[in-house]
Image (cartoon, rainbow, N blue to C red):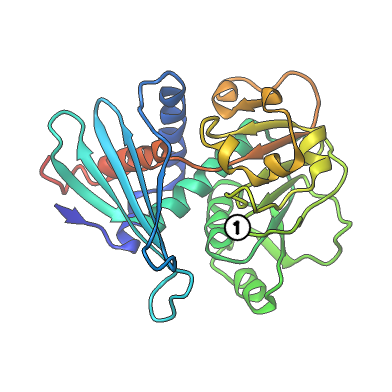
Amino acid sequence: MRILSADETRQALPFRPLIGALKTAIAEYRDASIICPERLVVPTTDKHGTVLSMVACAPDIIAHKLLTIFPDNTALPTLQGQVTCLDGQDGRFLFAMDGITATERRTAAVSMLGLSCFQPPRLERVLLVGTGAQAAVHLEALNELYPGLSVSIRGRNTKRIQSLTEGPYSALRIEAERNTADHYDAVITVTSSREILFDRSASPETLVIGVGAYRPDMVEIGPGIVLESLCVVDDPVGAPHEAGDILQAGKDWSEVTALADFLEKRPVGQEPIFFKSVGCAAWDLAACRMALQSLSDTLDI
């Protein structure tokens, strides 16, 4: 079984075709063609670490992601993981990808899919909240898919902001946010914050995409935006347990809809939209399909 490095994983998952693979998987997940139970989360015996196991099964392939989270790590990364792709017919182990890289890229691709589905009337200025790895991958995706955008970065770490503004994103105009009152056509938040980071009046002129706050105790987006917007989630099964922004705002879940409903049509009306992404193993399966296609010439399958 071939094991792809982080760089090989990145090369196997170009954004444009990955977004296409995600659209297919999202529709199949909606139609129950992909079986994707909730993730298994197990604490280590000393409570210092967490193990996550995520499985998705389709007729063609099976995807399994195994992640470890050890916040106290210094010599090793906090997050470590692997995504394994297996044949859906006979269970053969086909290949494995770097789990962190695969997760970062499919997460950014889901954000780009949301941006495409709910693109505001004008898309010239974007606010990116966060300076970590997900911020970098989202910039890479925007650089590839939306050249010419102006992107402002909001974060607490000035060195990280400077690093991102000087990064390899030549198609974008990137700068540190200067005025928090500025208007943005889209806002993307990519942090693990437990405090509200973006809180304005909801507007149909500004699409808000929440990527972080993946646990009930986390929050990035103010309740006013959540309550006053059409809330759309990528995974309607996992979101009621994981989408901290929506849970803390007290939004009625009967008013929350799924991204799968808007893959081919835009929402009716001009109401504000908040798109919340929490992720699931079905999106890892989509990444496996994309990688399998990329690797078809070099793998004996």
Residue 77 in the figure: left or right of residue 64 = right
Front-most of 122 and 107?
107
Give the amino acid at mark 1: Ala
The residue under the point 53% across, 51% down is 141
Which residue is located at x 62 percent, y 20 percent? 265
Q: How many marks?
A: 1
Q: Position of residue 282 (x, y in %)?
A: 40, 36
* Secondary-structure class at tag 1: loop
- Work out which quarter of the rendered image holds the C terminus and state it: top left
Q: Is residue 210 above or below residue 179?
A: above
Camera-side residue of 288 and 239: 239
The x, y position of residue 67, in whole percent, is 37, 56
Q: Is residue 122 visible?
A: no
Residue situated in front as seen by the camera: 65 or 173: 65
The answer to whether residue 268 is seen in the rendering is yes
Residue lying at 62% horizontally and 59% vertically, measured from the top left:
191
Extreme residue in the front direction:
45
Label 1 packing within 10 angstroms: few (<14), some (14-19), many (20+): some
> From the viewer's perspective, is 54 left or right of 244?
left
Q: Nearer the viewer, residue 36 or 26?
A: 36
Query: What residue is drawn where x is 30% and y is 59%?
Result: 8
Q: Is residue 278 left or right of residue 221?
A: left
In this picture, residue 239 sits left or right of residue 220: left
Q: Which residue is mark 1?
A: 171
Q: Is residue 207 above or below residue 41?
A: above
Which x, y percent locates residue 194? 69, 58
